[in-house]
Structures are given as C-alpha cells and as structure tokens.
Image (tube, helix red, strand yellow):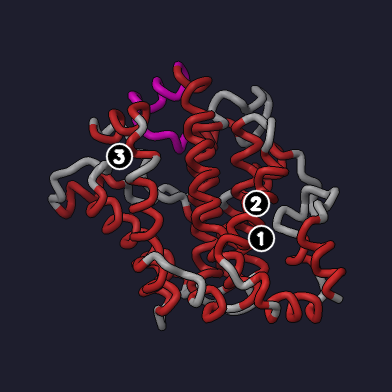
Amino acid sequence: MKFLITGLLFFSTQTFAKVLPSIFYADKSTQKEFCADRRYHDQNFWRSLMEKRINELTKGQPASTQNSFVTQSYLEIHRKTPQLNGVKFMGYVYANASHHLGRLVRYNAWPDSHPLKKKDRSFVEGPALRALTRLANSQLSPKLMYHSLELYKELSWSLASASLCGMDYTHEMIRDPNLSNAFKATTIPSFIKSFVAFEQTFLHVTMYQELEIKIPAMATILDQMRYMTFNGETHPSFAQWCKETNCRTSSYDLGNRIHFDVWAITNEYNLTKGNVKTLSKRLKNADIEVTANFFSRVPQL
C-alpha cells in the first residue's frame, strides 16, 4: 500500500479535470493510510505537493488559462472537503475571488462571439480600470497571475491538507499565528476572520508592493473593482463600503482591506449558512465553472 501511495503522489493524471494531486482521487482506505503516515505530515511536503501540481497545469500557459486552473483547484478543495467547515467555505470563496480576478486577466482574451463576453467584462468597474485593462493587459495579466499563483501556493497547502486529513492534522503543522488562529477557530465566521488576515498580510508584502499594483491601489483605481460577485451579482465594493464607514483610505490600507473582506465574506456566509446546495447553485449562477472550463479547455466530469 505504501508503494501505491508514493505512486499516487507523484503520478500526474492525464485528464485536467483532476486538478488536485492524485491522492485526492484515491479510494478512502488509501487516503486514510496516507494521512496516518507521519512522513507526509509536514508543511514543506504539502507545499511541495500542491506547488508541483499547479505548476504542471499552468507552466507555459497564457494567463487566462492559468487563472482557470487556479479557480478549478479552489473549487475542487471546496467539493472534496467532506465537512461543512471553514476550509470548505473558503474554497468556495476563493473560487469566486479567482474567477473575479480573472476578469482583468481574460478581458482581452474573450472571442468576440462568446455569449459570456459582455456580461463578464461588465464587472470590470470604473473607466480608469477599464482603460488600464485594455491598454496594459499584456503587462498586467502576467503580473496578476504571477501573484495569484503565489497566493494559491501560500493558501492551498493548508486548505488541501485539512480537506483530506482534517483540521487538527493541519493545525499541528502551522507556524503562522493568523493561520493558527484560523485552524483553532470553533466557528466558520472566526475562521474567515483569521484566514483573511493571513491571506491579506501575505499579499500586502508581495503583490501590493509591485508598482503596477501599488500605484493604482493607492490612487483608489482598484477600489470600485474590489468586491465579490457571489451568485453572479455585483455586491458592495470597497469604495462603497469605505464611503459608508468613513474609512478614509484606499484599498491599499491593510487593516481596512482586511475589515472589508471579512465583512463581505461573512455576509455571504450569513446569507447561505454554508449550505452545500445553495453554494452550488450560486456557483452555477456566477458562470464560474463554465468560464474556467472554456479557458482551460477542461472536459466536464
């Protein structure tokens, strides 16, 4: 059985529909033995495992295709997580977030005749951002996708390991205090608060220090686009939230960015209560999977 597990870890499936490492598609007994094997109970192992798989899928691909694989990977984490918990819900959230970020990446990649083109592009808010996206897409897309992939690698190891082996299993491997608080949380809203703090702190010292992103963020150009499109709907943006709360900053401000994201994501949880059927319906209404499948050319399962 150990030989089988080793083979599963390093065997790349030939169908791109299986976007996670192969152990996620093994039988339950093999997965149980894998989770019990202390050789694999290591943060560096999990980081390497998730990084290897996403690199296999995205290497040499255009930014729109890379975005689709990241979106699909978050979707799979959501679907593969058996319990209703913070990991399952955040898999849903990050699938939505990756899909929304992808609108900037695929803005100029839609075929003229595609029925989703007009709707998808309509969510890119603000004339300055639309102009920036049209004119600078060849430079902006690779930059955005580089950081989106780096974020996926930073987030996915803990989400995936907890999805397969449980929350306590993952918590034992964690060193970051925000991430530790997330996996100690006893409620999904508490998980959201700590996990978002972990995510945005990472982005603040990486992506937000790139001048191509830092300058538009500080100039409030990104504020109208900073919102979630759960259910394929426009929800309040950072710009609207900041006006209502008198936050007096752009979305470059780390503290206010965390507060806004926690508020927006918690609202979605309060609305749906994490109900799996409700989340599935809202994913479908948002055209997330059909868009990701189109740009990655992934066959339907």
Determine the secondary structure under disc 3: loop
Q: Which mark is residue 76?
A: 1
* Disc nearer the start of the sequence (3/1): 1
- How packed mark 3 is, by other alpha carbons closer than 10 Å (few <14, some 14-19, many 20 or more), is many
Range drawn in magenta: 122-135
Q: Residue 125 location in percent, x, y?
A: 38, 34
Q: Is residue 43 above or below residue 151?
A: below
- In the rendered structure, which amino acid carries the disc numbered 1? Glu
Residue 106, can we see it?
A: yes
Residue under pointer 2: 72
- Say whether residue 282 is left or right of residue 224: right
Q: How crowded is mark 1: few (under 14 residues within 10 Å), some or many (20 or more)?
A: many
For mark 3, what is the residue? 223
For badge 2, the amino acid type reads: Gln
Disc on the earlier residue, 2 or 3 = 2
Is the stretch drawn in magenta largely helix, strand or loop? helix
Q: In 3D space, how far apart are the residues under numbered discs 1 and 2 (Cα atoms)?
A: 6 Å
Q: Quadrant of residue 73?
A: bottom right
